[in-house]
Amino acid sequence: MAELTGESEAKNPGEPTLPSKRVERRQAMTSLFETYRNSAPEDQNLRNEIILQAEDMIYQAEITDPDTEFYNKKGLAEELPRLMELANRTGESLSILFFDGRRLRRVNNELSFEKGDLVIQTIAEAIKQTTRKSDIQARINPYEETASQPQHIATRPGGDEFVIILFGTNQYLAVNIARRIQDRIQEISPELIPFYKKTFGEEFTARVGIAQYDPEIDKDYKTFLDRADQAVKLAKEQKIPDNICVNQYNPKTKTSEILPMKGSQMILPDRN
């Protein structure tokens, strides 16, 4: 097993690496415990504050992915139902993007899991640079009754799956956000994962499935996620490297239709 270091391990000298959030978390927790050990026993206020910080760090570790700092599967299961309920109360739009990186399994199997980690972190970096950093990294107050502005929450439920929750964003705007992230992935990939093009002969891309929340059909968060998952599966079947598909619900027929994009100029049918 490779020794744990502060950076993702690169097989060849000179290859780019990205910092390991696991190491950063461990260092932060170690520093906190060291402060506790060095504090005066009678300084109970300081010790109580350190305990609260440690508890918060442990909770954040439970709900976030250490490699990207995005919410993990547990965090997604907490945030998405809450925002669905908030959308019901406020009437705000809510959409999700389901990303799938091309050939990640082949990267893991044919190259290495370390290079697979770099591909994962490249997607995460593109998402961070394209959406608002504060919205991704800051946890929305779970007791908040209203939302004054759109929120973008990035999650990595597991493996190569990325789900971005877009509160206050309809499916039309969601398509634009997906395109911007795809464009950013292709812009930074030559620098961060140059081995990908050398191996497969083309730049790294990601397919996207999109679904807009509709209370008539999305009775729980898993149903909502599944519609976006169905859309990304069709996007993968189309054999277009950066394809986007939208799972649109028609309230008149009470059915869903998955619509593949034919380029950024495609106009989606009106939901109303």
Image (cartoon, grey):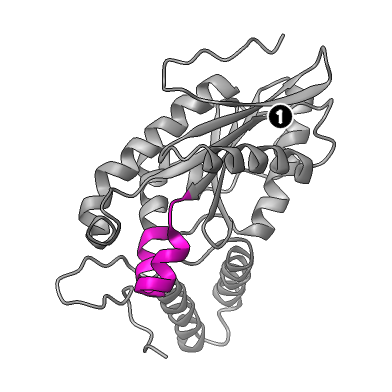
| One can see residue 103 in this view | yes
In the image, is residue 142 above or below residue 74? above
Q: Is residue 208 above or below residue 124?
A: above
Residue 39 against residue 14 in the figure, above or below: below
Q: Nearer the viewer, residue 260 or 206?
A: 260
Residue at 42% in and 91% down: 1
Question: From what the image shows, is residue 138 above or below residue 44?
Answer: above
Across and down, in percent, residue 49 comes to: 58, 69
| Residue 109 included in the magenta stretch of the image | yes
Q: Residue furthest left?
A: 14
The x, y position of residue 270, in whole percent, is 64, 10
Q: Is residue 188 left or right of residue 169?
A: left
Which residue: 58% across, 84% down?
Answer: 42
Q: Quadrant of the C terminus?
A: top right
User: Are there few (<14), some (14-19), or many (20+) residues within 10 Å of tag 1?
Assistant: many
Q: Of helix, strand and loop, which one carries label 1? A: loop
Residue depicted at 72% across the width and 51% down the height: 78
* Stretch of the chain drawn in magenta: 101-120
Depth check: 207 or 154 in front?
207
Q: How many marks?
A: 1
Prevailing secondary structure class for the magenta stretch in the rendered image:
helix
Q: Amino acid at mark 1?
A: Tyr
Q: What residue did someone put label 1 on?
A: 213
Q: Position of residue 219 (x, y in %)?
A: 85, 36
What residue is drawn where x is 51% and y is 49%?
100
- Using the rendered image of the protein, determine whether residue 24 is visible from the camera's viewpoint: no
Q: Where does the image place residue 242, in percent across and percent down from the top left?
A: 41, 38
Query: Which sits in the foreground, 246 or 66?
Result: 246
